[in-house]
Image: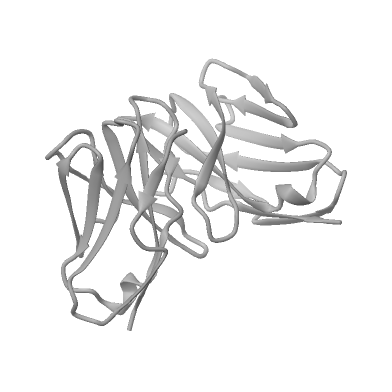
């Protein structure tokens, strides 16, 4: 069965810290995505990647970067965390035009 | 760019009743998908309907798509307590990205 694993379910960091969120999928999917989910705003796309070492900006990339050194792993980086980045972060992967498979999310709090 | 809008934002019904959720979108699409999210978990794909299809069934789920009105509906028949979740529509305008609506929070009362 398809599995997308996010490294942490809950994470607490301080303002100004560099934060890494990790996502690993075991399906050999070429597409991977990072979203943030906030009440009343639904899911918003931060970055996505179609292949190793490739990345594309989504709708809200400011304050974030990503890394995809291996096909199965897609990392989201908060360069200098701020309180407005407190949110639920969801990773997803897909094969071609097939539906996306999601991890269980990381609830990140920035103090 | 939020494309999908869902209606209602919240829905509370009795177990055994049918639940209907609606989704509207703005631009042309290749397909429309529905996902479910249980509290504190990730999204799970339920059903995909292509732009040239009008209706699709999967178990107790029925999805319709009206491309002329840019709208879709999800019907869950004979609801169960386990159907309590948030439901999201997502449109595929191309380029393998999805644009999600804000979701409908469904509560099934025993």
**Spot occupied by residue B99 in the image (x, y as percentages of width and height):** 42, 42
Q: Residue at x 27, y 55 (%)?
A: A22
Left or right of residue B69, residue A61 in this image: left
Q: Is residue B58 above or below residue A33?
A: above
Q: Quadrant of residue A8?
A: bottom left
Q: Nearer the viewer, residue B59 or B50?
A: B59
Q: Residue at x 32, y 70 (%)?
A: A85
Left or right of residue A85, residue B69 in this image: right
**Spot occupied by residue B45 in the image (x, y as percentages of width and height):** 53, 37
Q: Quadrant of residue B95?
A: top left
Left or right of residue B105, residue A48 in this image: left
Q: Residue at x 51, y 31 (%)?
A: B32
**Spot occupied by residue B53 in the image (x, y as percentages of width and height):** 58, 17
Report the residue that reaches farthest toward the top.
Answer: B52
Q: Nearer the viewer, residue A5 or B23?
A: A5
**Spot occupied by residue B49 in the image (x, y as percentages of width and height):** 55, 24
């Amino acid at each position: 069965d398809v599995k997308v694993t996010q490294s942490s379910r809950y994470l607490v960091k301080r303002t100004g810290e560099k934060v890494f969120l990790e996502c690993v999928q075991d399906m050999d999917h070429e597409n991977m995505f990072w979203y943030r989910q906030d009440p009343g705003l639904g899911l918003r796309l931060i970055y996505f990647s179609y292949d190793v070492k490739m990345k594309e900006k989504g709708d809200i990339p400011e304050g974030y970067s990503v890394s995809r050194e291996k096909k199965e792993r897609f990392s989201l980086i908060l360069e200098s965390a701020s309180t407005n980045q407190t949110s639920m972060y969801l990773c997803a992967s897909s094969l071609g035009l097939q539906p996306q498979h999601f991890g269980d999310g990381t609830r990140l709090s920035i103090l | 760019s939020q494309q999908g809008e869902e209606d209602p934002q919240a829905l509370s019904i009795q177990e055994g009743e049918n639940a209907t959720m609606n989704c509207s979108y703005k631009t042309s699409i290749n397909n429309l998908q529905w996902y479910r999210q249980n509290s504190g978990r990730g999204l799970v794909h339920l059903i995909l309907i292509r732009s040239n299809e009008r209706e699709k069934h999967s178990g107790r789920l029925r999805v319709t798509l009206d491309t002329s009105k840019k709208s879709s509906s999800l019907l869950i028949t004979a609801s169960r307590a386990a159907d309590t979740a948030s439901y999201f529509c997502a449109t595929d305008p191309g380029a393998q990205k999805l644009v999600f609506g804000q979701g409908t929070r469904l509560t099934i009362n025993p």
